[in-house]
Image: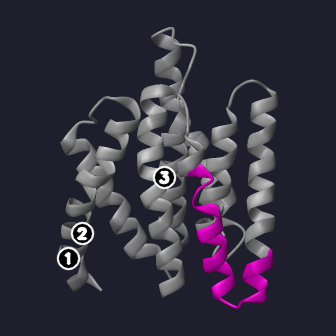
Amino acid sequence: MPSAVPFLVLVAMVLSPLLRHIVTLAVARRPPIRLFTAATVGAVLVVHYSATDPLHYLALGVTVLAGLPAVWIDHYQFRLPDLLTLGPYPLLAAVVIATADADRMVRIPIAAGIVMTAYALGVLAGQLGMGDVKLAGMLSFSLAWNDGTTPLIAVVATLVVSAPWAVAALVRRRRRLPYGPAMVTGSALALLVSA
């Protein structure tokens, strides 16, 4: 419903300084306000256009509230804090249980487990950190809401999105690359493609 878009943009603009403050407290740096606000507005609009029911809306909202500050912290410090990656798990699990949909209650943990296993292989190869594994699980709760393929689409989209960043890091001779921003961007693209 397009009439809700101006209200959602307003909500995002109110949320943006609060989420930005979380990042500032964690890393003692302020993300660029325009870029952070644009990311928040984009995330809220992705939630709006991809949520299929009120509980999915809630799951996506929780994911955005935790995921957006987490990826900015990852950008600055190459770490994804447990508070923001593991903290939402109980609430997301409660939302899934609240659906009373047996298929969903089975599909989501299986999809999260598969995606987390794939990311754990990246940890074993020395290319990813455990924070990426935890973030992948959190994202999978919202991605696998309607089907089990959306998390897989997100993994592929993440690889595509991260490729230019990886090339830029190689050119600049950087050995470390925050993967969280690419994961969240790939997940947003997967949600939009699957909506």
- Asked if residue 145 is positioned above or below residue 42 in the image, the reply reads below
According to the picture, the residue beneath numbered tag 3 turns out to be 67
Cα–Cα gap, marks 2 and 1: 6 Å
According to the picture, the residue beneath numbered tag 1 turns out to be 7
Instruction: Kindly report the secondary structure that dominates the magenta region of the rendered protein.
Output: helix
Mark 1 burial class by Cα count in 10 Å: few <14, some 14-19, many 20+: few
Residue found 37% across the figure and 60% down from its top: 43
Whether residue 11 is visible: yes
The stretch in magenta equals 85-106
Cα–Cα gap, marks 1 and 3: 22 Å
Amino acid at pointer 1: Phe
User: Where residue 3 appears, x then y in whole percent?
Assistant: 21, 85
Which of the pair 3/160 is nearer the observer? 3
Instruction: Let me know if residue 153 is in the magenta part.
Output: no
Task: Examine the image and state in which quarter residue 30 appears.
Answer: top left
* Residue 120 relative to residue 152: left or right: right
Residue found 30% across the figure and 29% down from its top: 29
Instruction: Let me know if residue 101 is in the magenta part.
Output: yes
Which numbered disc covers residue 11? 2
Amino acid at pointer 3: Gly
